[in-house]
Image (cartoon, coloured by chain):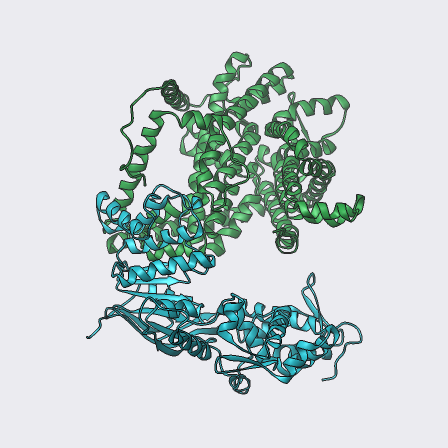
Chain colours: A cyan, B green
Amino acid sequence: MAKEVILELKNVKKSFLIGKGRDITVLDNINLNIFSDDFVSILGQSGAGKSTLLRIMAGIIEPTEGEVLYKGIPLKKANARIAVVFQSFALFPWFNVLENVRVGLVGQGLNDEEINEKAIRAIDLVGLDGFEDAYPRELSGGMRQRVGIARALAVEPELLLMDEPFSALDVLTADNLRGDIIDLWREGKMPAKAIVLVTHNIEEAVSMSSRAVVLSHNPGRVKAQIPLELPYPRDKNSRDFKFLLDKIYTILIKPPEEIPMMLAAGRYQFLPHAKVGAIAGLIELVHDQGGRVDIYALSSELSMELDDIFPLIEASVILDFGEIKEGDFILTEKGGKWAQADTLEKKEIFKEAALQNVQLIKQIVQVLSTISKHRVSEEFFIDILKNHFTPEEAWNQLETAIDWGRYAELFAYDYDAGELYLEENETIDM
Amino acid sequence: MKIPISIPAETFKVRLIDIAVFLIILGILSFLIYIASEWGTPYDRTLEINLNPSNIPQYALQSVARIFSAYLLSLVFSIWYGYTASRTKIHEKIMIPLLDILQSIPVLSFLPGVVLAMIALFPGKRIGLELACILLIFTGQVWNMTFSFYHSISTIPKEMREVVKVFKFNKFSKFLRLDLPFSAIGLIWNSMMSVAGGWFFLMACEMFVLEDRDFRLPGLGSYIQIAANSGNIEYVIYGLGMMILLIIIIDLFIWRPLIVWCQKFRIETVPPEEERESLIFNIFSGSVFIKKVVDTLNNALNKIEKFSYREFILSGNPVMNKISKALGLILLMVISIIIIWAILKASSIVSSVSLDNILTIIKSAFYSLLRVSVALLIALAWTLPVGVYIGLNPRAAKMLQGIVQIAASVPATAIFPVILLLLIKLGGSLDIGAVFLMLLGTQWYLLFNIIAGASAIPKDLIEISRVYGIKGIRKWKTLILPGIFPYLVTGLITASGGAWNATIVSEYVSFGGKIMHAAGLGALISLSSASGNFGLLLLSTCFMSLIVVGINRLVWKRLFILAKTKYLLE
């Protein structure tokens, strides 16, 4: 059966200007088709440009290069047939449920009865009948997101875009809402012909959608597309389900060989945003479990999501405390030693590992040692980092490096002055 | 967006309150007619203010009309300016610093330009002078409202703005459904402050000397001033009593109900700790008549909104686009021509100022700076302990806050005559007296902010310091001062701005038929305005503007950033 192409992305690239003619590429070379009856999940770590991609699909932002075709016609502005569900719900606090849902219908040239009829139908669909007069502040998070979904469905969109719609909800509420959406989709009650879901929750993607698109990060490129053809309702404990989870996990985490390659290729090393305390917690836990764990099992055991646990794993890999094989996380010899060490030894081991493996920390220590007063403004490093990252990311990078460097007692940081400095007798011979 | 579906058939019962509403509307109509008939008359150069107290209500009504006309003008201007500034980056880069400068220019510096222009537009007509007076009050009211509106709409969350794009709102819908509700609360609070400020400058705006000519309009401000000039304290007190009564009535019947009503525009989704109440609001929301009016208004807005989506109105219509572009271009050209003309004119005026005068300006600026600093220090010295005490003791807060609020709602200028009388009796000079006059207007900003700051210090921090026996100076250094710092900075910024603005009215006072003035920049501005020395006026205004903006940039802004980062209690 030939499926209709609803949205077509051709060689889409998105860069943001970061001043002085420099720019940073967030998305690169994205080629993607959304067909009718497609339920696509877009997966990637934070910083992979998932949300940017969704906004390009919605027509909210324009790609720097390439084009987006809606049913073969270039998408210039937001299109009335493409609706979006937002992570923060984005409801109008001064409108009640009905008024919030009517919002998208007012400009469509319908009369009042038609508008109300459509709005109420959408409200019933998401199970909010009886709450038409309630204001958002009277509703729980889950119900607020139902309003957000009703608002999107009320305009009877061809394409429904959802930007991490469950990540602001607690676990049980999110599960419940996911179930309801799958039911609507399966039973053909969903007015939309296709759904795109942006998420960092792999289990969510595998349990809901018919295809997963995995993005790499920095810049975001399509790393893989994995068909998810398990029959609904999907059993999370089945072997097939677990196999798919493992597969996606393995694709998502870049193989460790890539890291030195990246350095060689002149790209600045990306520090995952992980605090030393959390890394230590992970390493000790893995050590207690025999030094090798399944990442998916670990994340569900800790009830941590992709965005929480990946930075820790990546940091461990960068520091050479662990490695990844076939969806498992395995401690290295050094990692095992670190897990067992006492507080002082831990600092020593970490210091060595950081100096050996972390480009930014190495650079900071070098600069501080060469300058006679051993004190440098943070702006200096931010300027360097801005050549490689967005301004926001540059600050994140420095913040992580400061956390690590402080722990290792490689250098200190004066918050008030915004300066990094070497404490006395700490000049290090490199 | 009210939908007439599930409304039960309401028994159209007319209650007592509906009769009251009807009477109020009647009253407002006759008030408007009265004002129109007054303002339509030719200007009477020999107008005498009749000090007989039976005339006070009539004068008061006229002053109220002026203040509210100026307020409405401020509201429209604020929304237009703030909206335009937030539209594009270029607008923002020009318009926001410009606003900073405009804000620092004292009311009296606008006086000659505004008055001469209005008199030229309406020669011999009273409406010209009325408009001038309204415009002057406007220049004292508008800036903080504009900042508030601009700030509100530029802090609308990103996802809310995306909703507007995704669901294809047009400009009108976006303005009506997002921008306006989002800024309502800030706008209403600032409206309160602005109208209060209107009372502050009423005396200066209703009666003034320009190029040695006397201008006066019948009003409460001129009544009090004349009464004070003739040394008639009894009449001054009557006038002041009327002013205080009006302030209380306006607060009770307009601001309080509005504040309760605008709670629906809160952004946070958690309920507030304490619900705001207004008796008047509760009574009036029981009126069937008002309900009808509100419903009709709602329906009309919905109709207008729908109508605005027709192709030819707003979006996509090339003819309309061309027309609006052309209009914008013409407006831009007119403004540029006016600016260029003003600069040329100004430079020719300023070139007439002698070197001696420039030295005087610098000296005066120094004195005023000293006075403002001393006033701030004195204010700080008493508001800090008192504010912290009230803020940390909820019981004291309940008792004292009411008293403090009443004290603060009395406009400082209203007590000026009393203070001046004391000053003259004691034989003091205005050089020092001006400090106290400034203090009257500005100390409240500090006090309120300190109370708010102290009551926002988290309970567990207070308990911790008790557990560790932190007392006395150490408690102030480790807990209280860092805790209230952001509030303190906000209070100081407002108080400093207010003090500079108050130099105009406090360094130069005409009282009991004679003019007293201190050596200061404010006095210089008043003096040069009265004598028509426009070169001196322009130059000293520029100087004041420079100082105020400079201090804002160099001192307050830095402290503010520090307060927002390091001392933020979350």
Residue A173 relative to residue B297: left or right: right
Instruction: Give the x, y percent position of residue A341.
Output: 71, 77
Query: Quadrant of residue A397 in the image?
Result: bottom right
- Residue A430 or residue B4, whichever sits in front: B4
Give the quarter of the figure containing the N terminus of chain B: top left
Residue B138 relative to residue B501: left or right: left
Residue A309 relative to residue A245: left or right: right
Residue at the limit of the structure toward the left, as seen here: A1
Instruction: Give the x, y percent position of residue A417.
Output: 70, 63
- Residue B218 or residue B245, whichever sits in front: B245
- Residue B51 or residue A259, whichever sits in front: A259
Instruction: Name above or below for residue B59 compared with residue B551.
Output: above
- Residue B35 or residue B351, whichever sits in front: B35
Instruction: Give the x, y percent position of residue B261.
Output: 44, 35
Residue at the limit of the structure toward the front, as seen here: A238
Residue A198 relative to residue B227: left or right: left
Instruction: Name above or below for residue A185 compared with residue B374.
Output: below
Q: Is residue A367 visible?
A: no
Residue at the location (39% across, 73% down)?
A238
Instruction: Name above or below for residue A374 compared with residue B509.
Output: below
Instruction: Name above or below for residue B223 compared with residue A148.
Output: above
Q: What is the tally of numbered marks visible in this picture?
A: 0
Instruction: Give the x, y percent position of residue A231.
Output: 31, 71
Q: Is residue A209 visible?
A: yes
